Image (cartoon, rainbow, N blue to C red):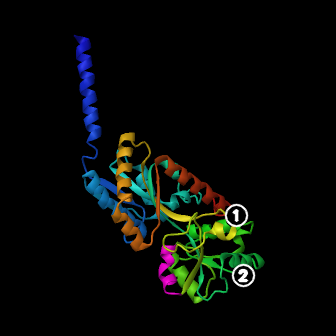
Amino acid sequence: MHRIVRALGALVFACVAATAGAAYPDRPVTLIVPWGAGGGTDAVARFFGSMLEKELGQPVTVVNRTGGNGVVGHSAIAQAAPDGYTIGLITVEIAMMHWQGLTDLSPASYTPLALVNADPAGFQVRADSPYKTVNDAIAAIKANPGKFKASGTGQGGIWQLAIAGLLADLKIDPNAVPWVPSNGAAPGLQDLVAGGVEFVPCSLPEARALIDAGKVRSLAVFADKPPALYPNLPTIKQATGSNWTTAAWRGFAAPKGLPKDIETRLVAALKKAYESKEYKDFLAQRGFGAEWAAEGDYAAFMAKADADMGKVMKTLGLAK
């Protein structure tokens, strides 16, 4: 009789556990964005938030947690309970912040869900620049170290690492192009148009308006393939032989220790949103690049980004 009671108890527990697992989510989900409202990361998060609501059947509330150069929001994601009710959209800065000594967080601090967007750098010059190809610009830099300046983000930002990594990969001193810090790509591009700097290695969506207006030219893209936005633009590898690539990327993650069944549910929902016509239209409208990698593949992608960023930052003396 005792054995029968224990067996029945175990069966009831298993059924309750299965029902609980199948019930996820049974309340609203919070989606944390480490950057401010109105920017590209916020737009991607809000798009996926609305799509996840339909797929999960629960409200998804987007919360912007800004501050500390991204540290505040990334920390809030990592420190949340690993129950699937708090997830976040992490960005390329997670592969950079710990090298700068801003936080102990790294890509390994999360349960990786899915990479959904990557916008590689383009090598931009003024429309009237004498450099017709990226090799022309590289040759000028090599012959005149220190003469030409670049801008497009703050000191140690992703776009400084783009050009410094390329130069280092080509066996040129990465400090050969002095960096002029700016509060983002827009002021850097305005400085380029005004003649204050010669190069701006920022994402193509950021440079799109000035490229289409005929004030700026892009010579190459820091990616493995030509971009959908400008399909005739050569890659850095095609132009120079360098394998160096750099992109501003965005992907979903959860706190470390997320149960596998919830991880699987979230990844499936994200993939459905990623493959939707609505997302294709969203990307095309903004000029953003589609990029998908899930779970283990996404973890490997972030680990490579982390290693690449650390290597360049050490070379520039920016790593703590």
The residue singled out by tag 2 in the image is 147
Magenta highlight on residue 210: yes
Secondary structure beneath label 1: helix
The crowd level at tag 2 (other Cα within 10 Å; few <14, some 14-19, many 20+) is few
Tag 1: amino acid: Asp
- Left/right placement of residue 59 relative to residue 162 reads left
Give the side of residue 320 with respect to residue 47, left or right. right
Amino acid type for the residue under numbered disc 2:
Lys
- Predominant secondary structure, magenta span: helix
Q: Position of residue 255 (x, y in %)?
A: 42, 48
Q: Which mark is residue 169?
A: 1
Range shown magenta: 204-214
| Badge 1 or badge 2: first in the primary sequence | 2
Give coordinates of residue 54: x percent, y percent.
26, 56
User: Compared to 316, does 205 lie above or below?
Assistant: below
Q: Is residue 143 visible?
A: yes
- 305 relative position to 288: left or right: right
Q: Quadrant of residue 271?
A: bottom left
